[in-house]
Structures are given as C-alpha cells and as structure tokens.
Image (cartoon, helix red, strand yellow):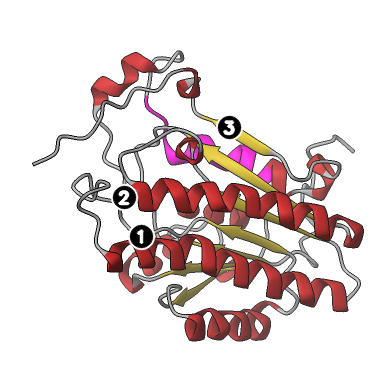
C-alpha cells in the first residue's frame, strides 16, 4: 500500500472542525469529507454552514452544527451533539476565531472585543480539546488534534487581542502534546501566513513580501492539515508548529498602527 493511501480509518475516525463555515476551517473540513471521513462542520453562521456542507464531496458525510463557542454552555452542547452524531470524536481541528478589525489596535480595542477573542480562540480551544482528550483516554483510543495559530503569535499584528490569544494557543498546543502523548493523542499547530480567506481581506501588495510571490489560499493549508491529523502520515509528530506561509515569516511587514 502506498504511504498516502487511506490516510484515515474511515470507519473509526470522526473529526470535529470549528470555523468550518468559511476560510481555512471550511477547506480542512471539505478535505476530510473528500477522504471519506464523517465530519462535523462547526460554525456560528448557519447560512455559511449550509453552503459548506452542501459543497462537500459526499454531503451525507458532512454534518452541521451551529453555535457560539464564546459561551461555555455552547461548547458543552457541541460536545454532547458531536458524541450523538459521530460517536467517539477522534480528530479535532480548532480553526474558529472572531473577525478582526484593523481599528482594534492597542489603544482602541474594547474589553468586549478582547474577551470574545480570548473566549473563542483560547478558552474554547482548551475546553473542547481537554474534554475530547478525556473521552479518548477513557476509551483507550488514540487521537489527533490540530490548532490553527498564527505568525502573529510571535510577530506583532497591531491587534493585541488576536496576537496574544494566538500566542497562548501556541503554548497550549505544547502543553497538550506533552501531557497527552502518553495516551497516544497527538497535538500540533498549523501556522498560516497571509491567507486570503475567511475574515482576512489581504492587500494584494502584500505579495511583494512573500518569497513565493503570492498570497495564500485556504486550499493551500488543507493538505498539510490532513497530513498532521493522519496517524498514518504523521504518527510520530506531536507538539510541532508547522508554518504554511510561502516564506512570509522571513520578514515583519507591519508598520506601527496609525493612532488618532
């Protein structure tokens, strides 16, 4: 059998993908369905969810769940519904993140905006990942998790709520990987660059800073995401942060924010 054949166990693997209504999360969820894996698409926007699941290679394998992951009660509802629809969740992708606005710089970001970014990116990522891990441990089953972080975990973005939450996710991945490895649960981070998808509207001029000469697309992330999730392909990879950015991390292209 070729090494890339049957990257997933179709009868066993059951992924939950947050932020699957658009952007990178959508691309990853669709790619999982294309591999023949039953996948729960999670998003706050029902219209986006319907469009995403309808676009799946096999819509019968694409399940939709809508809710606000900034709320702990909704995270718990997601976990309960995922178990009912999929059984044991073996794969988890956390791609959900609130929209970011350039005007929310250090001196302007509101408490509510700060708290919501942290709640979705970090708090939901921690709670969902830990609860999924507990279920895998109880079942004596292996699993894999993937967190979408950012280049701005280490490079200022002029959006302190976004950058700091992504930096916290970066170390959370390492904490998870260190603790859960003994249970055959792998945890990694995928680090996108300038990806023209989801809530990010990229200036085409940004391409001049990218060694490969173009902005990224959501589909550029999906193959690496699936490789990291697959125990067959990346079974000895855990605690890693894999950058998919066309080389953009080689420079910091941001100027300080314009302050009123």
Viewer-proximal residue, 186 or 57?
186
Q: Which of marks 2 and 3 is nearer the N terminus?
A: 2
Q: Which residue is denoted by mark 1 in the rendering?
A: 98
| Location of residue 11 (image quadrant) | bottom right
Q: Nearer the viewer, residue 150 or 227?
A: 150
Secondary structure beneath dot 1 equals: loop
Q: Where is residue 17 in the image (x, y as percent from the top left)?
A: 56, 62
- Please give the name of the residue rendered at 52% of the width and 61% of the height, measured from the top-left corner: 122
Look at the numbered disc 2 and give the secondary structure of its residue.
loop
Q: Residue, x 37% and y 53% (percent of image)? A: 161
- Residue that mark 2 sits on: 199
Residue 251 point in image, percent of width and height: 43, 18
Q: Is mark 3 on a helix, strand or loop?
A: strand
Label 3 belongs to which residue? 243
Instruction: Verify CB contact (< 8 Å) between mark 2 and mark 3.
Output: no
Label 2, label 3: how many angstroms apart (C-alpha)?
19 Å
Whether tag 2 and tag 1 are in contact, CB under 8 A, the answer is yes
Which stretch appears magenta?
Answer: 215-226
Name the residue nearer the viewer: 76 or 159: 159
- Measured as percent of width and height from the top left, residue 61 is found at 60, 67
The N terminus: image quadrant: top right
Asked if 237 appears above or below 37 in the picture, the reply is above
């Amino acid at each position: 059998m070729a090494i890339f054949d049957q990257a997933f166990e179709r009868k066993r693997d059951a992924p939950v993908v947050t932020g699957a209504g658009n952007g990178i999360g959508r691309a990853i969820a669709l790619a999982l369905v294309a591999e023949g894996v039953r996948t729960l698409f999670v998003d706050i926007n029902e219209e986006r969810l319907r469009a995403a699941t309808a676009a799946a290679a096999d819509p019968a394998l694409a399940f939709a769940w809508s809710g606000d992951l900034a709320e702990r009660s909704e995270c718990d509802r997601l976990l309960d519904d995922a178990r009912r629809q999929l059984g044991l969740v073996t794969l988890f992708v956390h791609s959900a993140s609130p929209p970011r606005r350039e005007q929310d710089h250090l001196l302007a970001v509101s408490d509510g905006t700060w708290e919501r970014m942290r709640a979705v990116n970090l708090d939901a990522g921690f709670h969902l990942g830990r609860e999924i891990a507990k279920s895998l441990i109880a079942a004596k089953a292996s699993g894999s998790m993937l967190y979408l972080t950012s280049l701005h975990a280490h490079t200022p973005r002029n959006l302190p709520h976004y950058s700091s939450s992504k930096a916290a996710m970066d170390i959370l991945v390492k904490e998870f990987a260190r603790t859960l490895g003994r249970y055959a649960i792998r945890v990694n981070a995928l680090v996108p660059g300038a990806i023209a998808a989801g809530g990010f509207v990229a200036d085409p001029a940004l391409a001049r800073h990218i060694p490969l000469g173009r902005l990224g697309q959501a589909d550029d992330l999906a193959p690496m995401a699936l490789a990291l999730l697959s125990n067959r392909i990346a079974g000895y990879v855990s605690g890693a942060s894999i950058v998919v950015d066309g080389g953009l991390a080689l420079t910091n292209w941001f100027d300080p924010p314009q302050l009123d």
